[in-house]
Amino acid sequence: MPQSQADQSQQKANLLNTRVGELVANDFRSAHLFSQHGIDFCCGGGISLARAIKRFDADEDALLNALVALAEQGDKQQGLEQLPLPDLLNYIESTHHTFVREKAPLLLEYSQKMVRAHGDNHSEIKPLAGWIRALVDDLVPHLMKEEQILFPAILGLYNQVEMQTCFGHIANPINAMQYEHDDALQIFEKISELTNGFTPPAHACTTWRVCYASLAEFEADLKQHIYLENNILFPKALALANS
Ligand SMILES: [Fe+2]
Ligand SMILES: [Fe+2]
């Protein structure tokens, strides 16, 4: 349930009164935010967030909003960890697989437009379009393998239904999917290098900017998607298979 304004103000007041070191100890993801906002969470960790913001001259509103968003994300993650397996499978398909299928054609369209308009003058554009094509060509069959082979097998385990499979132990397709996740993340590293961390140059046209913003959004969704499968779904399926 979304928080009320009053709850959020209270949460922000609590954050300001908490020591920076304690915030990092409670949630290591906040360390990255403190670095981004120039706050020394290592040597300066013993002071309250309010004092640290003053000392390091950080943007209080932006930092508090980011910390609140992080906490909400954490709550959502915890909710997903507690979902029964069939609901988790549904969630992954309806949220993340749908996202890939909706956004992948747009990424191809934007990058092909960029090749036509700027490919001859900017050396990064053609390789970028090539990596986007490689990513989509990897991800689309990956989703199909999960939906048609692995996820039904996990559901069979959950429902204790004897299934005839061609892959032996469920660890085999899980390992294969994990390799494919690593491949997709490696492609994104190349894309991130080529795009300077999805930062368009000052002269970039609208398509170029939309393409980079869409890539950043796609990467964030893909990381969440892979985290859910590697760290929540697969360990649960393996535990069921070995029980
Ligand atoms: Fe998936
Ligand atoms: Fe996957």
Image (cartoon, rainbow, N blue to C red):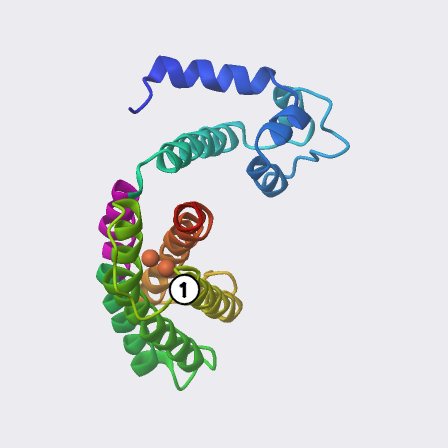
In this image, 49 relative to 44: left or right? left
Q: Which residue is mark 1?
A: 177
List x then y, in percent, for residue 124: 47, 78
Q: How many marks?
A: 1
In this image, 11 relative to 159: left or right? right
Q: Is the residue at mark 1 in contact range of ligand 2, meaning its CB lies under 8 Å from it?
A: yes
For image coordinates 40% across by 62% down, the residue present is 169
Query: Can residue 107 be seen in the rendering of this structure?
Result: no
Q: Nearer the viewer, residue 139 or 9?
A: 139
* Quadrant of the rendered image holding ligand 2: bottom left
Q: Nearer the viewer, residue 223 or 219?
A: 223
List x then y, in percent, for residue 192: 49, 65
Q: Nearer the viewer, residue 210 or 78?
A: 78
For image coordinates 71% across by 21% down, the residue present is 47
Circle 1 SS class: helix
Q: Residues within 10 Å of mark 1 (few under 14, many from 20)?
A: many
Query: Can residue 51 be seen in the rendering of this structure?
Result: yes
In the rendered image, the vertical position of residue 145 relative to residue 87, given as above or below: below
- The image quadrant of residue 52 is top right
In the rendered image, the vertical position of residue 177 relative to residue 37, given as above or below: below
In this image, 80 relative to 59: left or right? left
Residue span colored magenta: 86-100
